Image (tube, coloured by chain):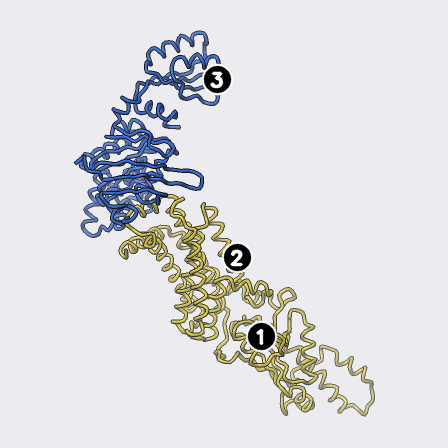
Chain colours: A yellow, B blue
Amino acid sequence: MIRQIIAITLKELKVLWLDREALALLFAMPMFFILVMSFALEGVFEAGSKGHPIEILVVHQDGGRLAEQAIADLKRMEGLILIETYEGIPLTSDKAEQLIGRGVYPLALLFPEGYTEQILKNANDPRKGKAIVYLISDPAMNLQLLATVKGAVQGAIERRVLLARIPQRLKEMFGTLGGTEGQLDNMLEDPNISERGRSGVDFIHTFPKGFNAGRRPTATEQNVPAYTIFGVFFIVLTLASSFLQEKKDGTFQRILAAPLSKTALLIGKLLPYYLVNLIQIAMMFCIGVVVFGMKLGYLPALIIVSLALAAAANGLGLLVAALGKTEPQVNGLSVLLAITLSALGGMMVPTFIMPNLMKTLSLFTPHAWALAGYHDIIIRGLGMKEVLTEMAVLLGFASFFFVVALWRFRFSD
Amino acid sequence: MMNTSILIAEDLWKSYAKTDAVCGLTFEISRGEFFGLLGPNGAGKTTTIGLLSGLIEPTRGHVVIDGVDLFSRPMEAKARLGLVPQNFALYPTLSARDNLVFFGRIYGLKGKRLRERIATVLEMVELTDRADQTVATFSNGMKRRLNIAVGLLHEPDILILDEPTVGVDPQSRNAILESIHALNQSGVTVLYTTHYIEEAQRLCHRVAVMDQGKIIALDSPTRLVEYFGKGMIRVEFNAGIDDMFLDQIRLLGLVRVVDDQRRRIHIETDRTDQASKKLMEMMETREGLLKTLDISEPNLETVFIHLTGKNLRD
């Protein structure tokens, strides 16, 4: 049986090798996406706009009015949704870190205890002691997006601090010269007032506990895995077309007339596509490392996620081969699945900026789990144990695809 | 040697949702025999081939190849079979040799033995000098020959050929028939399906006539013609004929085939000479109506029409 499987695999590799255009497309397509998207489309995401609001967790430990006011201001800002409770309970810093660590939310804002007091106490001289606001972010969050959101949040908080401090300082300086409160307030509402630099608030940006905080994700580290997964699933088209061709030509019938089991035929037939997928993944990550200087993280973990990802892609390929009766059906279904699942799984737009329904739906794609696995390893610096869930889910997808495919599969038309 | 059965089909049925594609086939093929399965499209020939080569599971019944039950010990039984399907069933982007290497390995051939068998079958089908060309560049005749070569690679005891001459030019067809005949002469049992009557008549020791999933007659071509053969007059008219004229024609013999427009009829008769003479007399009063007239003496095709009421090539 092993010899027969090898014979089928070698034949298939030879057939694939002879169709170089198709093979080139399989490798060139994700490569093209990685290069073009990484260089050209960086920062184009609309995240943080009115249509695609960013959800920010708020941990309010202060209890003072300045934190309250800043939160109220931020709530009024377009493109931001502030979440102060989780499952009805006010957020704690541990809970927020946990939610970010799990990739549920991308960002948290923490106003520590004594925040308001600290600002008001040292209103005259912020250098005496600055208040601190913590910004906790998912290491996998797009850098440009983070910078934009951070800027907006910082601006809103500082403005509120200024508003609180300046009257006190002005009153101290000019209290004896007269003037009304109203005039003062009007003057203070002027956004051009240039006191921000000395607002007395320090923003400390951290990652959730246990995450590698020493290194920030780059665009490549986000795009290479995403477009690799996108490309890997294009094997569905090549694989399903090849099965259809064998059925059409009658070669399956001929092989099955030989003393050979259907299992051996399927293994021999799928193995080369599995290998192609692995080579594809290796090549894409090589480009990431060589061209963009990307760090890969813990390699064994990367390998098991890749093995599970390729299994899911091959399973889907067999499923399409089982469902598609004609060439246009197979082509249409393959492209539809490759594009739709990629978009839904967060290959093109990160899932955390998607509406809740889409976010939930993304969990039904192998793409989202594979990307989560890659991000855990490459960006969050996690190891084997932490990606076992992603690997198990990917293998679950693979098993589901294979079982349904084998149930529906016919070796002849 | 002719007295030992190499293939036994016993009460073989294949039913699909609403139809029975094969209904209770029972027959035996002797070692060294050239056995023909004759029937029009849709008669159940390809399903029968699928059942006999283990590609289709029967609804019930047995197939025994050289004493081995095909469905309980498929690996052993299949190793004794060689299948030449109706499709080319080849990899067009690979060379003839690569195709043979692949299928040879599937049958467990390797190394020197594989190389020797490839050389032998290539010579047998006269493709030695084209061995390293891709199959896509081959003519239909060459593809048919390679298709047969693949079936012969592992030296099967019985070779099953499903319409092996469809779509080839007369010259290639003749070459194919000769090589299959030579194979049978060398001791290989052949099961051959065709709807070309002359092929069956020329090659087969025995012919099973199939219609609607059943074998309706089984004997040597000579005896089938002897028992069931009738002469046949095929007439084609320039216009549809009326009821009265059709009734007059019925007096000449048994009218077997009438098309919808009544422009084409087949008359079955023991005395083709008398019937055709009378028909010509009747045509004298109907000037311009007769388009063609074709008279066949009893042969396998007239046997088939006699048995089924259908034309073999419909």
Residue A107, numbered circle: 1
Q: Amino acid at mark 1?
A: Leu
The x and y percentages for residue B310 are 39, 26
State which quadrant residue A198 falls in: bottom right
State which quadrant residue B131 falls in: top left
Instruction: Count all numbered tags in the image, as a single digit.
Output: 3
Chain on which label 1 sits: A
Say which residue label 2 marks. Answer: A340
Q: Amino acid at mark 3?
A: Gly
Q: Amino acid at mark 2?
A: Thr
Q: Residue at x 36, y 52 (%)?
A: A16
The x and y percentages for residue A58 are 62, 78
Residue B297 or residue A309, whichever sits in front = B297
Q: Regarding mark 3 in the picture, which secondary structure is present there?
A: loop
Q: Is residue A177 above or below residue A239?
A: below
Say which residue label 3 marks. Answer: B240
Residue B73 or residue A181, whichever sits in front = B73
Instruction: Calculate the distance from the C-alpha at mark 3 to the C-alpha at mark 2.
Output: 59 Å
